[in-house]
Amino acid sequence: MADLKVNVNGITFKNPVLTAAGPNVRNAELMLKAVAGGAGGVVSKTVSLKPAHDLRPTIRRAVCQGIMNCETWSETPFEEMLEEYRKVKETGVPLIISIGYKPEEVKKLGSIIEKEVAPDAIEFSTHYVGGEIGPLIEVARSLRETVKLPIWMKISPNFPYVKELASRVSEYVDAFVAINSYGPVLNFDVESMEPLLGSEYGQGWLSGPPILPIALRIVYEIATVQDKPVIGVGGIEKGVDAIKFFMVGASIVQVCSAAIKRGHTVYGKIAREIEEWLDAHGYRSIEEIKGLYKEKLKERRKFSKIPVMTIDENKCTGCKACISRCIQGALYMDGKVAKVIGENCIGCGYCQDYCGYGAMKLQEV
Ligand SMILES: Cc1cc2nc3c(=O)[nH]c(=O)nc-3n(C[C@H](O)[C@H](O)[C@H](O)COP(=O)(O)O)c2cc1C
């Protein structure tokens, strides 16, 4: 059986599935439920010096199995959270405390938390720090000057210069966490025109499966420009989602929306699915698949001219699933099999995703 144990910044996690900051880890009771549900480590809801006051409703269903929210940070004063953290620390499960936002805030919170709780690491959220590199580095540097604990920097997906930020800030932090929820986004009920969320005009942040590809791209970029560990988060619902994050360079992962949707046992379930996938593919540890995507890219087939879709008539079952997927009119049925009109095909590859029989392949002809 594959070994799920991982070590990041000298912290040993019994499995690589941690909680991500959110309502799922708002207090000790919920954090302990996550531990009982199999989480390999706990990252708590972000606290700041002043408690938040979020307008209700704060969490709604969104497109493509996602979630939209307008939660900001913890509504519980951080002084009250100190006791909550201690209860989690007693379990021996690695505890990472999330804080925000301005340099003077993280300095104060960081030093109190290091002294009073001594968690395994401190994560800081950059969600409300803006899009300029300078202020983001400033927060990281302030925290570095203040605490000795490992520092995890959480990256927001709307930040445009991720590679530059990661390489420049790497000296101040011990790991990166990518990504926070995406947005702002907006949705409302079309009949009543009521916003779904209680925020100013119904705007909020998108999370869950719709943001998984954004998160993969950002984890890949961070992992390729610097050497500090990267923690993947965004849309993970199943073991194979997490496997993709390891392949693009993540060391461990975090989960928030899937827990909101499916409860506290989701962490352990994802961990078991990771183990099953590794076993089924002959890998003994996460380390063995970490960064494999970049390696494989070197062997990628490249076309020297525009390819055309080809169909293996022995494999085509005549199911017609591809036919309506070609807006170019390059596919037609010839008796019981699908065929391609070469001069209409633009080699986009889209129809191939609907062939469940492996009968379609792009080729240079
Ligand atoms: C309702 C809600 C509240 C959240 N609160 C925080 C927070 O306080 N601090 C933070 O860094 N991220 C917060 N997040 C972002 C998550 O930690 C996570 O980065 C993001 O949702 C993507 O992961 P997911 O798709 O597994 O949810 C929140 C997400 C949701 C859905």
Image (tube, rainbow, N blue to C red):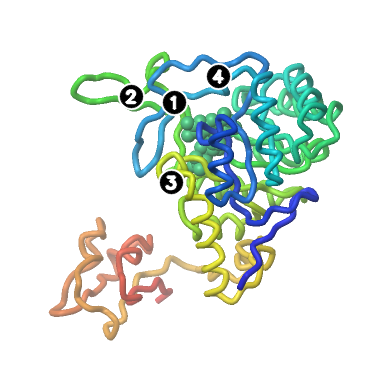
What residue is at 27 percent from the left and 64 percent from the top? 344
On the rendered image, what quadrant is the N terminus found in? bottom right
- Residue 65: image location, x then y, percent: 36, 44
Question: Is ligand 1 within 8 Å of the beta carbon of the residue shown at mark 1?
Answer: no
Question: Could you tell me how far apart the alpha carbons at marks 2 and 1 are, in whole angstroms?
Answer: 9 Å
Q: Residues within 10 Å of mark 4 (few under 14, many from 20)?
A: some
For mark 3, give the secondary structure: helix
> Marks 2 and 1: CB-CB under 8 Å?
yes
Q: Residues within 10 Å of mark 3 (few under 14, many from 20)?
A: many
What residue is at 56 percent from the left and 16 percent from the top? 52
Query: What amino acid is at disc 1?
Result: Gly
Question: Is ligand 1 within 8 Å of the beta carbon of the residue shown at mark 3?
Answer: yes
> Marks 4 and 2: CB-CB under 8 Å?
no
Question: Could you tell me how far apart the alpha carbons at marks 3 and 2 are, in whole angstroms?
Answer: 19 Å
Q: Nearer the viewer, residue 181 or 31?
A: 31
- Residue 20: image location, x then y, percent: 57, 40
Which residue does the numbered mark 3 point to in the structure image?
A: 209
Which residue does the numbered mark 1 point to in the structure image?
A: 204
